[in-house]
Amino acid sequence: MEEHIERIIWTEDQILERVSELAFEISTDFKEKTTSLVVIGVATGAFMFLSDLVKKIKLPISVDFVRVESYGFGTESSGKPKISSDVKIDINGKHVILVEDIVDTGNTLFCLISHLESKGVCSVSVCTFLDKPARRKVHFEMVGGGKFYRGFECPDYFVVGYGMDFAELYRNLPYVGVLKPELYN
Ligand code: PRP
Ligand code: MN
Ligand code: MG
């Protein structure tokens, strides 16, 4: 697998250090809240970040998943994300943090935030490992004073690893790298 990677952008150590900082920030921000916090991972991509993040959040939280797909097997967003699996927990009146591996066009979060808002949540925050603002097409807003947390700003390359895939491969790499262009062209 390593031979498919042209260059590493963030190493495993750099990632874990940043994840600890984010977890500390979240723990501090939600310490005084009386209603409980539900951390919702966007499957599949967010599974690894979610798992590292929640281990370091020092608060009683619930964990759930939604499943959304918009990229399928290509490198371009279809623009129409499909929620193929909904949350299990009743989130009415709860503070929610949506956890993503990457925000690109913004289509996925736009769709998910309005979906969660319609369930009567108290607030929606977003915690994304990577943010690629250069590619944003859709503007989205937090709900009920929620915050936007991000690990790193990502340059405009197609990146894989730490949960992120190309055609469902490379998710298990513990670092983030750029795939050799001959593999996706
Ligand atoms: C990827 C990524 C985000 C979304 C971001 O998911 O994990 O969820 O795209 O792109 P956007 O901001 O342009 O909507 P993908 O659809 O590839 O599904 P996956 O998580 O199962 O890989
Ligand atoms: Mn995803
Ligand atoms: Mg994908």
Image: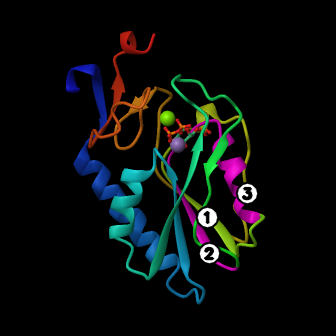
Q: Secondary structure at mark 2?
A: strand
Tell me the residue at 59%/90% (across/down). Answer: 34
Q: Residue 125 bears which disc, if any?
A: 1
**Callout 2 environment at 10 Å: few (<14), some (14 to 19), or many (20+)?**
many
**2 vs 3, front mark:** 3
Tell me the residue at 46%/26% (across/down). Answer: 157
Which is more N-terminal, label 3 or label 1?
A: 3
113 or 9, nearer to the observer: 113
Q: Residue 115 bears which disc, if any?
A: 3
Tell me the residue at 35%/22% (across/down). Answer: 179
Q: Is residue 17 above or below residue 3?
A: below
Residue 18 location (% of width, % of height): 35, 56
Which is more N-terminal, label 3 or label 2?
A: 2
**Callout 1 environment at 10 Å: few (<14), some (14 to 19), or many (20+)?**
many
Q: Secondary structure at mark 3?
A: helix
The answer for how far apart the CA atoms under marks 1 and 3 are is 13 Å
Look at the image and give the residue range highlighted in magenta.
93-117
Task: Name the residue type under label 3.
Answer: His
Residue 176 location (% of width, % of height): 33, 37
Residue 77 shown in magenta: no
Residue receiving disc 2: 95
Q: Is residue 76 above or below residue 65?
A: above
82 or 139, nearer to the observer: 82
Task: Name the residue type under label 1.
Answer: Ser
**Which of the 4 image quarters holds residue 115?**
bottom right
Q: Is residue 76 left or right of residue 114?
A: left
**Which of the 4 image quarters holds residue 77?**
top right
Farthest residue toward the right?
118
State if disc 2 and disc 1 touch (CB < 8 Å): yes
Task: Name the residue type under label 2.
Answer: His
Which is more N-terminal, label 2 or label 1?
A: 2
